[in-house]
Amino acid sequence: MIKTLAQAVVPFFFFKAPLTKITNQNLQKTINQLKQAPSAEAATKQALEILKAKYDSGTVRTYFFFWMATQSDPNVLWDRKGFMHCTQQNHLLRLLLVKSEQVEERDIRLGYSLIWYISIHQYLKITLEKDRTVGVDPWSYGRGAKWNEFASGFTLKSISS
């Protein structure tokens, strides 16, 4: 019951939503661009830069704009500008990487942390090679996080594999 209620408020927070058909031509163009990347790591970094240029984030705005978290259609999300919740940015990143065939769905897992030790936050754990997993957080990337860093506590952390 709690999971169902949470899903009604924030879609795809506790599980990965199905990847839907792409109908947005601009989104499809970006996916086609990423197909040309030489590696999964290069595609992931390129996708992060694209998301960083389109969207921004903020812990306080997460609460002020809570109602925006209910939108889950990537074709609609892609045309938005400005603030976007971590779950939405992660969903778009996952969609870009899987649809561009750079990363397999099974190699992307959801990760969670606490920001300011009170606000639950989602990031992605992506296995790029057989034995190398990185923490990828487009929400924090736009706020200064570097490769393999995600928001946690009052700072950033990384995954060591």
Image (cartoon, rainbow, N blue to C red):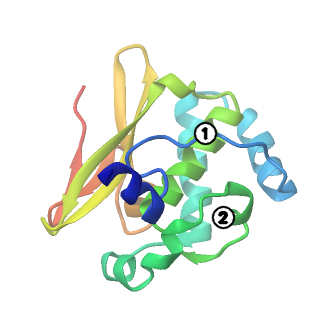
- Residue 54 on image: x %, y %: 62, 69
- Residue 131 on image: x %, y %: 35, 15
Foreground label between 1 and 2: 1
User: How crowded is the residue under tag 1: few (<14 C-alpha within 10 Å), some, or many (20+)?
Assistant: few
Q: What's the mark number on residue 49? A: none
The amino acid pointed to by label 2 is Leu
Q: Give residue 43's quadrant in the image.
A: top right
User: How crowded is the residue under tag 2: few (<14 C-alpha within 10 Å), some, or many (20+)?
Assistant: some
In the figure, is residue 60 to the left or right of 105?
A: left
Q: Which residue is mark 2?
A: 77
Q: Which residue: 25% across, 37% down?
A: 159
Q: Which residue: 60% across, 67% down?
A: 53
- Residue 9 on image: x %, y %: 44, 65
Q: Quick check: 25 above or below 132?
A: below
Q: Which residue is mark 1?
A: 18
Judged from the image, the secondary structure of the residue bearing numbered disc 1 is loop
As measured in the structure, the alpha-carbon distance from the residue carrying label 1 to the one carrying label 2 is 15 Å
- Residue 130 on image: x %, y %: 41, 13
The amino acid pointed to by label 1 is Pro
Q: Which residue: 49% across, 56% down?
A: 11
In the figure, is residue 128 to the left or right of 97?
A: left
Residue 147 in view (yes/no): no
In the figure, is residue 32 to the left or right of 137?
A: right
Judged from the image, the secondary structure of the residue bearing numbered disc 2 is helix
